[in-house]
Image: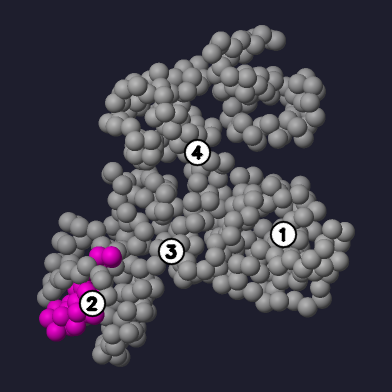
Amino acid sequence: MSKILIVDDDQGVRATLRAILKHNGHEVEEAASGDEAIACMKKASYDLVITDLGLGGDGSGYEVLREARKRPFPPEVIVISAYGTVDDTVRAIKAGAFDFINKPFRGNDVLRKVEAALIGRSSIARSGGGYELNGLIGRTPAMKEVFDLITQVCKTDCTVLILGESGTGKELVARAIHKNSRRRHMPLITVNCGAIPENLQESELFGHVRGAFTGADRDKIGILQEANGGTVFLDEIGEMSLSTQVKLLRFLQYGEVRRIGENRPVHVDVRLIAATNVDLEEAVENKNFRKDLYYRLNVVAIYLPPLRDRREDIPLLADHFLKRFSQKMEKAINGISPDAMAALMNYDWPGNVRELENAIERAVVLTRSDFIELEDLPPKIRYGAADPYRSPLSGKGNTFRIKDDLTLKEVERAYIVHKLKRCKTYEEAARELGIGRTTLWRKIKRYGITLDEVM
């Protein structure tokens, strides 16, 4: 149920709109003037404001619009306009209004425009001093910008590129966009490009006909065709082969897919969302990613900041995960102790939100108290500045010191960081570790080792 504020000095107009909207399940409040509407918005949050531009008395419709756009999570605004006021309507749209309703209006037209305006807002909920949208949680300005962008792009079918480190929640953003778009009743298919061998990527996405290549013993419909009417989320798109990039570019240009071994193209209606944790501009410079495809994908870019850059969100996220896992495991845990929370706040979270989620789950499993205590957290978080993953575990020269309560994986990660710090190049580090460069890259990716750690 959405909360809507109707602003009009005509009681009859307010009554008509109230009846239309309440009949369709919306919560409605009214204001008879601009000043009254502004006072309402300062006391409560709304998903949508419907305001007449020509308000009598104090406060114009433009002032209502300006106040609405200043709210922390601004409501959409639909302006009511009498015929013959085209200039005023255009001015309102340029100032940020979502749409306009002409007087006299029809109920169906009002509902259609209200539904379009509310797409993307209905799932934004308050969450302990912050906001939540389909599993994304935050209250920092950076996350507010993410929520605002999601709210805008889900109203359209534009291609979206989601950027951010591993574990920041890129798939959650893709799911939020799809769930709040007009395609929400159609399929969302997620493809991890890095998990599909290069020689199979084209077949998986576009399909093939029987006999197209060795092993093609039957016809196969590709993922893009399977998702017709819905959304395809291409995660780790930086891992896509150059040959598949060519075909994907053609799909974005013409909306056509052509199965391997087939000459007849098929038109499909699919919205594409892509994500990557690599620098695509650098990949373009290195000839590993096509420049024309990069520009096609980068219509709207949404950047998810790493958790270390939005530490204000850590208590909010930790509390969210604590409630979820406590309920799942049927354990009565009332909160997180000050010492444990201080450790969570001081840690740099190379694995981002996913690592925080795992740490809270572990703590819920291990705690014997009704609070999460410092000793319930993983060693790397408890040690703070002496973090065994990132830290000064290595001494000068060739000395490498570790604590005796680390797992084998923790030791391996710390040793790789130690070598990367000492060596000038990745090739040199790989040689000293006795592994190939490709193996080193895989381990860096697996352990979430960041550039900051090895500088």
Residue 180's tag is 3
Tell me the distance, in whole angstroms, between the alpha carbons under discs 4 and 3: 23 Å
Number of callouts:
4
The local secondary structure at tag 4 comes to helix
Front-most of 394 and 1? 1
For marks 3 and 2, give the one nearer the viewer.
2
Residue 291's tag is none
Q: Quadrant of the N terminus?
A: bottom left
Tell me the distance, in whole angstroms, between the alpha carbons under discs 1 and 4: 28 Å
Image point (33%, 32%), residue name: 331
Up the image or down, 303 lies above or below 406; here it is below
**Residue, disc 4:** 354
**Residue, disc 2:** 23
Q: Quadrant of the C terminus?
A: top right
Circle 1 crowding by C-alpha within 10 Å: few under 14, some 14–19, many from 20: some
Q: Amino acid type of disc 1?
A: Glu
Front-most of 204 and 341? 204
Compare marks 2 and 1 and give the one earlier in the sequence: 2
Q: Is residue 191 visible in this depiction of the protein?
A: yes
Q: Are marks 1 and 3 in contact (CB under 8 Å)?
A: no
Q: Is 76 placed left or right of 3 in the picture? A: right
Compare marks 4 and 3 and give the one earlier in the sequence: 3
**Residue, disc 1:** 204
Q: Are marks 3 and 2 in contact (CB under 8 Å)?
A: no
Front-most of 204 and 410? 204
Up the image or down, 225 lies above or below 88; here it is above
